[in-house]
Image (cartoon, rainbow, N blue to C red):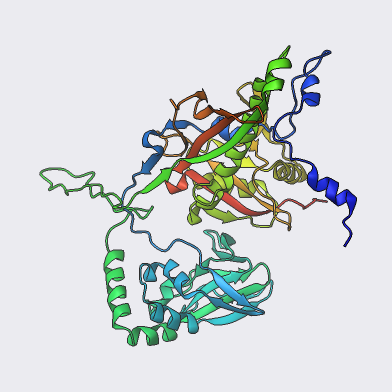
Amino acid sequence: MTVDSTSEARLEVPRQSSLGTAAARNLASTTKSAPQMQEITSRWLLRMLPWVETKGGAYRVNRRLTFTVGDGRVEFVQDGSTVRVIPQELGELALLRDFDDAEVLSAIADRCVQRDFRAGETLVERGTAADELHLIAHGRIGQASAGSYGDEVTLDVLADGDRFGEHALLDEDARWSQTATAETSGTLLTLSRADFAAVVANSPALRSHLAAFTARSEQRQNHRGEAEIAMSAGHVGEHELPGAFADYELKPREYELSVAQTILRVHTRVADLYNGPMNQTEEQLRLTIEALRERQEHELINNREFGLLHNADFKQRIQTHSGPPTPDDLDELLCRRRGTKFFLAHPRTIAAMGREFNARGLYPDHTDLGGQQVPAWRGVPILPCGKIPITPERTSSILALRTGEEDQGVIGLRQTGLPDEYEPGLSVRFMNIDEKAIISYLVSTYYSAAILVPDAVGVLENVQIANWPR
């Protein structure tokens, strides 16, 4: 058996674990720049977030008790062209939340009927009797109603995982208050009131659960779904005032600090002989910290546990009306929250916004942000962030953020005063010098982000960035 000599030689080459002397000499002679790095970005999110000291490594968000239930999206499984709702996902419906009888949920899922629709098809007509729940497995559906002056007004755009008609399952007199029209082809599952009633009739546990749900829904709530604080206004004389208190969530969410770490290795020969005129250890550390900060911002956007894209409330996610990012879409994103501090979008998405604005003869203003001119819409800065993903279909997302504890917005979490702290929330700890004379430093940064109230973050989803207006 023969062994390729080239492969054998390749296997014998040891993997380099620190900066070599040949590269180090490049910093020790002639007129030169400090080492440059293409990965460095503006990192606007890290600069704009107010950072809150997080002692104990965790931050608890206490909120008022809310009766809003089942505001998540429903998920499905697909077997070829057949689509079926996951039984446990029916718990996302308000009237089935916390109901965990797997057998009954499976019976309900089995009665959901698949329906494929085409673009332009009217799925429900305003004013007609409503007797079905519709679960959207795939596609975009627009909801419209009559405006104050007889014109047609678009109310909402629904997409994968959304639903409509939930009220029809319990209300025999329910009617459609809007017309639903398919904007694309797609698939939905329908559950009729009769089928749902048949399951309820055979399940005492479900009947008891629905009775409790009805009792909860009759409690007074504000427009945000929070338990209402009773009060009286405009009264005269000896009017009896109502008693009130603000109830809290019994199980508030806690955000634990996440960590990004790496081990920086520097050979003692490099540190001893090639430290002039630039400190080799300092330059290596500077580039390592830049890479850690880039990773930190990526996690704040994309981490499934605390990242803004995954933790934005479903009610604060909206769809574009036509695909590309139009001024109307940005206005709708703005109107859903008070005091939006900035938009965050991928640079290519910002370019697509510019094209749509220019096609309409609009030119966004610019605003000064820390001495730098940035584009703005309605006075709200539009900041670039290359960590927001772009799908293979060339769609992305635009975030709108309100920040700060006082404004009940988004905050960054970190802990300062760490051992061997090099920057706030970042430590550089000497580890050892091994038998190969390589110095090792543990570089760590601890961070997270918390959304204090749901409307602190809004997301415009499925933004088409490949459109070129003519």
Farthest residue, direction left: 238
Seen in the picture, residue 285 relative to 279 is either above or below; the reply is below
Viewer can see residue 381: no
Query: Which of 400 and 357 lies nearest the eye of the viewer?
Result: 400
Name the side, left or right, on which 417 lies relative to 8. Answer: left
Horizontal and vertical percent position of residue 130: 47, 78
User: Which quadrant, please, contains the N terminus?
Assistant: bottom right
Seen in the picture, residue 412 relative to 308 is either above or below; the reply is above
Seen in the picture, residue 329 relative to 338 is either above or below; the reply is below
Horizontal and vertical percent position of residue 252: 34, 49
Query: Which of 6 and 389 lies nearest the eye of the viewer?
Result: 6
Asked which quadrant contains residue 238, the reply is top left
- Which residue is located at x 72 percent, y 36 percent? 363
- Which residue is located at x 45 percent, y 72 percent? 88
Name the side, left or right, on which 276 lies relative to 459. Answer: right
Query: Which of 427 and 402 lies nearest the eye of the viewer?
Result: 427
- Which residue is located at x 33 percent, y 58 percent? 67
Horizontal and vertical percent position of residue 128: 50, 78
Horizontal and vertical percent position of residue 237: 12, 43
